Amino acid sequence: MNKSISGWFKKNAIHFLIWSVFIVYEVFLVGILFGKFGHPIGYGTHYLLIAIFFYGFSNYLLPWGLARNYAAIWRVPLVLVVWVGIFIFLNFELDKVLLVYGMAPIKAVKEITWNYAFQIIFRAVYILGFSCAYYFLYNYVKQRNLAGNLERERFQQIIEEEKMKRALSKSQNDFLKAQINPHFLFNTLDYVYQNVHFDSPEAGEAIMALSAMMRYAVDANESDEYIRLGDEMEQVDKLIYLYQLRKNME
């Protein structure tokens, strides 16, 4: 729970920073202009209401108003009028409560007047301007990040495809080598045998024995079945025969 709250604060740190700067700026500006600062609770409740007004419009009402192009002509004005009206009413009700406890801001009144309404409307338009800017900026950054992620995924896919092509090419080459090399070797040994066995029968027999042993080794690697003991003994005899030939030559 604590980690999720901490993560939420870190994720929205820029929001808290901007709101802090905005609130400090306005509090000191109003205090200097009127020569008097309000109650901290009065400031806190009003800026909380402004934040709700800001995010309610940018995150919910404006997206709803712009959801359908043909309906945006009447949806957006309707949302603006209703949302500003609600903002005026909530400001007035909040001021009434704060007046009871002596924490109301300087502009607080006991009844809604045209002058009071115009002040709140001006304030609402001011906040809604920032809210619209935030909405379009947020969506621009979101679309740009989405495009960047899609581009990275496309490059990653291309890289993976290239890796697969290389792996497939290597496998094909290895397969061809496995098919060509033994045949090339055996054909070469057969050629050498055909040229030497008349002049040197022992050399010819040695070549045939070596060829048989190598063919046996290749076939044994490709076979998943058990190898018979008799076949193994036969290869041992050939190996002994080759060693004996080499020993006699020495």
Image: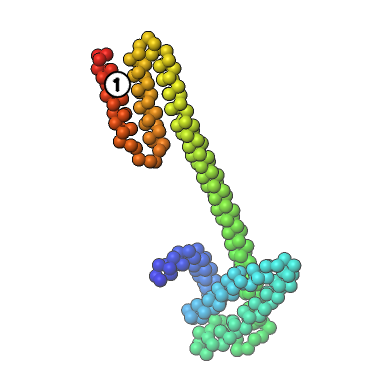
Quarter holding residue 243: top left
Q: Eyeballing the image, is 213 above or below 152?
A: above
Residue lying furthest top in this view? 199
User: Quick check: can you spot residue 17?
Assistant: no
The residue at 34%/37% (across/down) is: 227
Q: Is residue 163 left or right of residue 243?
A: right
Q: Position of residue 59 (x, y in %)?
A: 59, 69
93 or 152, nearer to the observer: 152
Q: Quadrant of the C terminus?
A: top left
Question: Looking at the image, what colour scheme do you see?
Answer: rainbow
Quarter holding residue 190: top left
Q: Position of residue 51 (x, y in %)?
A: 55, 73
Quarter holding residue 140: bottom right
The residue at 47%/31% (across/down) is: 179
Label 1: few (<14), some (14–19) or many (≥20) C-alpha neighbours in 10 Å: some
39 or 13, nearer to the observer: 13
Number of numbered tags placed on the structure image: 1
Q: Eyeballing the image, is 145 above or below 38?
A: above
Q: Position of residue 129 (x, y in %)?
A: 64, 68
The residue at 37%/30% (across/down) is: 216
The residue at 65%/77% (across/down) is: 83
- Residue picked out by circle 1: 242
89 or 137, nearer to the observer: 137
Check disc 1 and give the amino acid type: Leu
Q: Quadrant of the N terminus?
A: bottom left
User: Quick check: can you spot residue 171?
Assistant: yes
- Label 1 sits on a secondary structure element that is helix
158 or 121, nearer to the observer: 158
Q: Eyeballing the image, is 190 above or below 173?
A: above
Q: Position of residue 66 (x, y in %)?
A: 68, 67
